[in-house]
Amino acid sequence: MHDMDHRLLSALRDCGTDPRVASAARTLSRTGEHGALWIAAGLVGAAVDRERRGAWLRGTALTAAAHLASMGVKRIVRRPRPADRGDVEPLVRTAGRHSFPSSHATSAAAATVAYGALRPVGAHLVPPLAAAMCVSRLVVGVHYPTDVAAGAALGALTARVGAAWMNGGRG
């Protein structure tokens, strides 16, 4: 599994040699730090969609909770980042030393599930942006593919488990 992880990471990190791709990946990585993009999106949804304000706020809380859960898992697993193993040269600095799971992928997947359930615009706009966020972590060289996959699974599961609460008990 490590060999496949390394090969996929190297292939995607090579995409970062294109300055336009590197710039886009850096921007996505920065906006996704600590779930900021997704939390901001949820707060905007709550401000704009007054009819579902409570659901948007609960979805935002689920997204933040998923992010916090990933940080807890990182502290237990303590997998070094690819640069710490000498696998690739990263294009961005990271807030932490541990790689598994990707907190960016966790919050992106949680937002996809939570916000996608609220409005059609969320179901159409969030998934491609979340996927780009996940791929950006590989392009900038700070996660292995399995980190991103595990983060996405954790985020989706967290949001799905909290769906009934988010919708006011109407799972």
Image (cartoon, rainbow, N blue to C red):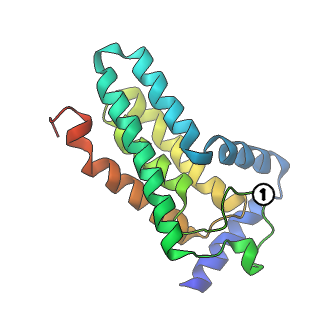
- Residue 32 pos. (x, y %): 60, 44
Identified at 54% across, 44% down, the residue is 35
Q: Mark 1, residues whose alpha carbon is within 10 Å: few (<14), some, or many (≥20)?
A: many
**Numbered-mark total:** 1
- Residue 20 pos. (x, y %): 80, 45
Horizontal relation, residue 77 to residue 80: left or right: left
**Looking at the image, residue 57 lies above or below residue 13:** above
Identified at 33% across, 34% down, the residue is 58
Please state which of residues 171 and 123 is positioned toward the viewer in this rendering. Answer: 171
Horizontal relation, residue 69 to residue 52: left or right: right
Identified at 36% across, 28% down, the residue is 56
**Looking at the image, residue 93 lies above or below residue 44:** below
Q: Quadrant of the C terminus?
A: top left
Please state which of residues 18 and 122 is positioned toward the viewer in this rendering. Answer: 122
Image quarter of residue 52: top left
Image quarter of residue 59: top left
- Residue 120 pos. (x, y %): 35, 28
**Kind of element beneath mark 1:** loop
- Residue 77 pos. (x, y %): 51, 75
Horizontal relation, residue 160 to residue 62: left or right: left
Q: Amino acid at mark 1?
A: Gly
Please state which of residues 149 and 60 is positioned toward the viewer in this rendering. Answer: 60
Write down the residue under mark 1.
16
Image quarter of residue 122: top left
Identified at 65% across, 75% down, the residue is 80
